[in-house]
Each structure stands twice: as structure tokens, then as C-alpha cells.
Image (tube, helix red, strand yellow):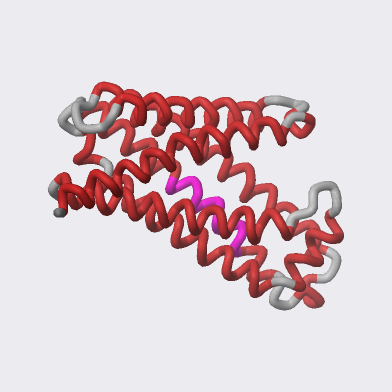
Amino acid sequence: MDLRKALVISGLSYLMIFITGFYANFSILETMVVPDNVDVTVANFIGQRTRLGSGILAFLDMLIFDVVLVFSLYPLTKQTNRKLTIVASVFRMLHAIGFGIALISLIRIYLITVNPIGMGVNLEDCIMHSLERFDGVWTLGLLFFGVHLAFLGYLSVKSTIIPKSIGYLLLLAALGYLVSCSAKLVLPGYTDYDQFFELMVVLFGVVGEFSFTIWLLIKGLKKAQ
């Protein structure tokens, strides 16, 4: 893959990840899951299966574009340090695999709510267990993603193609993911500070990754002219 194609494909893939990810997570999933209210959460999953299905499809699209980025980002930094570029690609693939495994739990919720009466008293437990598994595995996957961003940020700072400012913003995004996901996995009182950590991920991640996305598209389209 030549550099121009890599830039354009990476930029478009990142843009689609933003669109599908924000739609699936913030417009669908977060509106259906009500913290500390299992009954309402379960009722939402049962009564809004169509919305859940559209969210799952959006997540699947996001996963596909994430895998595309594993390969399209490679030409951008391989000349800077080929070995570290491979390591960065491996961690992004680990993130994609982790998210794919997590998504199975969300698909399970969609399948078991097709006949809620037949599930009986176990339905609530099955839904909440699957939801917790989805969240836990995805958090682990995002930890791998944070490591990927750290390598990508370092490679960008050292690159002769990518602006150093973009590299530093990616390192900041990596910090947000690493701190937040680590806290969620090991901090006993995480729920007391979850809004702070989530805001850190959103702000740092959006600034870093969206800046990178815009640069990829502008640089790629300029080279196409």
C-alpha cells in the first residue's frame, strides 16, 4: 500500500470509527443502561431490541474499520522504526480481538431477549452478567488500545511525515486510556470517580485521535491532487 492510499484509508477508517462508535455507545448503549437500576436496564433491552440491534451493527462496523487501521497505519511509521511499528500494530489487533470477544456478550443479550418469557427468572441474571462481561472485556481491550496509542504517539513524534504536535496529542490520548482503564480494572472505589475518568478518555481521546484523523485526511487528499 502506497503512502497516499494509507493516509486516505486511515483517515476515513478513523472517521467511521468516530461515527459508529459514538452512535453505538452514546446514542444507544448508554441510553439503555441505567446505573443502579437493573429492572429498567433489563426492560430497556427487552423493549428496545431493534435499537440494540442497530447499536450492535454499528459496533461491528467499528470493529471492521479498527482492523483496517491495523494495516493502513503500518506504512505511515514503518520507516521511523519498523519493529516498534509492528509492536504498535500487534497491540491494536489485540484491542480489536478483545472488543470482538466483548461484542459476543452484547449479541447474546440481543438473542436471549427474543423470547424473554421463555427465559424465566434467569433472564435478568443472564442479561446483567453478559453486560458486565461486555464492559469488563472491552475495558481490557481498551487498555491494549492505550498501549497502541503510546507506541503510535512515540513513532509520530519521531516521524518525518507526521507533525510532532500530533504525536504529543496521541501520547496524551494514550495516557487517558491507560489511566482510566487501569483504574476501572483495579481501583476498588472506581464508581465514585467514574465520571472523571470517562471525561478524561473522551477529552484526551477526541482531541488526540480526531486531530490525527483530520491530519490524515488533509494530508492524504493533498497528495491525491
Above or below 119: residue 39: above
Q: Residue 162: image x %, image y %?
A: 26, 32
Above or below 113: residue 124: above
Nearer-the-camera pick, 130 or 95: 95
Indicate left or right for 4 with 162 as reference. left
Name the residue located 32 percent from the left edge and 49 percent from the top edge.
11
Residue 166 within the magenta-colored segment of the rendering = no
Q: Residue 116: image x %, image y %?
A: 77, 74
Above or below 49: residue 12: above
Above or below 82: residue 56: below
Indicate left or right for 64 with 193 as reference. left
Name the residue located 31 percent from the left edge and 31 percent from the top edge.
87
Q: Which residues are magenta?
A: 96-107
Which quadrant of the rendered structure holds the C terminus?
A: bottom left
Q: Quadrant of residue 39?
A: bottom right
Q: Quadrant of residue 194?
A: top right
Q: Main secondary structure of the magenta part?
A: helix
Indicate left or right for 200 with 216 as reference. right
Name the residue located 70 percent from the left edge and 25 percent from the top edge.
187
Nearer-the-camera pick, 175 or 189: 175
Q: Residue 126: image x %, image y %?
A: 74, 59
